[in-house]
Amino acid sequence: MNSVIRPKNVAILIYEYVEILDFAGPYEVFLVGSNRGHDFSVYTVAEEKRPVHALGNLSINPTYSIHNCPTPDILIIPGGWGSRKEMHNRNLTNWINEKSNEAELVLSVCTGALLLAKANLLEGLRLTTNQNALNELKEVAPTSAVIVENARYIDNGKIILSAGVSAGIDMSLYVVEKLLGNERAIQAANLMEYDWKM
């Protein structure tokens, strides 16, 4: 009897004043790269299950709250202006820390790295973020971490960080490649008509 392999859960955290492309870019990549839902189940999660207002007042309805979210195999933490406030939200940083123990991969886009720092996940790692937020990351990163400038994304094994905004798309395509092969990642980039910076 053949065992059915379930799609990997890809949970994307959203919060007030999250950067739109930081979460929507990776969402699109994992959706398009999922082989019509066979390989990835992509969903949003917020602190509470009520509308979240991204930058520009875009209203998003999260699929789950942190209280009922399925266990993520891949956890994505986007950035945005709201990350400066949410990095001090112990409910979120504790949840990120807890879920990172269960996840196969933890990804950050842009200033999502600030939340990973406050969730105590960056000890001894190589880090990057939006080029305009490197000093902010230096202030909260552990002294054992090394901040790398001008990197599109950095793979530390379990934890992968990307630079700002559109770099999250490149990182997500890289992860699709890492998990499912180069052909799948190229196919996803082509379907999106996206010039992938590999």
Image (cartoon, grey):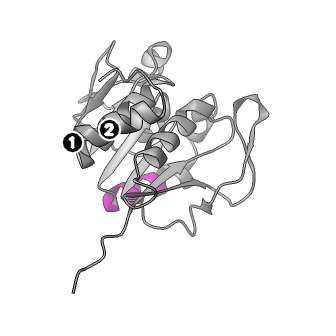
Q: Is residue 117 visible?
A: no
User: Which numbered mark, 1 or 2, is in the foreground of this view?
Assistant: 2
Please tell me whether mark 2 sits on a helix, a strand or a loop: helix
Q: Position of residue 3 (x, y in %)?
A: 25, 79
Above or below 44: residue 148: above
Q: In the picture, residue 68 is in which quadrant?
A: bottom right
Residue 117, position in %: x, y? 40, 37
Question: Can you say which quadrant of the picture contains the N terminus?
Answer: bottom left
- Depth check: give the residue in front, 69 or 196: 196
Mark identifier at residue 130: none
Task: Say if mark 1 contacts mark 2, CB within 8 Å.
Answer: no
x and y percentages locating residue 29 in the rendered image = 45, 40
Give the magenta range: 94-102
Q: Residues within 10 Å of mark 1 (few under 14, many from 20)?
A: few
- The residue that label 2 is drawn on is 185
At horizontal 36% and vertical 46% (from top left) the residue drawn is 106
Name which residue type carries label 2: Ala
Q: Which residue is mark 1?
A: 157
Q: In the rendered image, is residue 148 in sight?
A: yes
On screen, residue 23 versus residue 36, left or right, reads right
Residue located farthest toward the bottom when viewing the structure as drawn: 1
Is residue 4 magenta-colored?
no
Task: Work out whether 64 lies above or below 29.
Answer: below
Q: Residue at x 23, y 81 (%)?
A: 2
Q: Check disc 1 and give the amino acid type.
A: Gly
Question: Looking at the image, is mark 1 or mark 2 earlier in the sequence?
Answer: 1
Overall secondary structure of the magenta section: helix
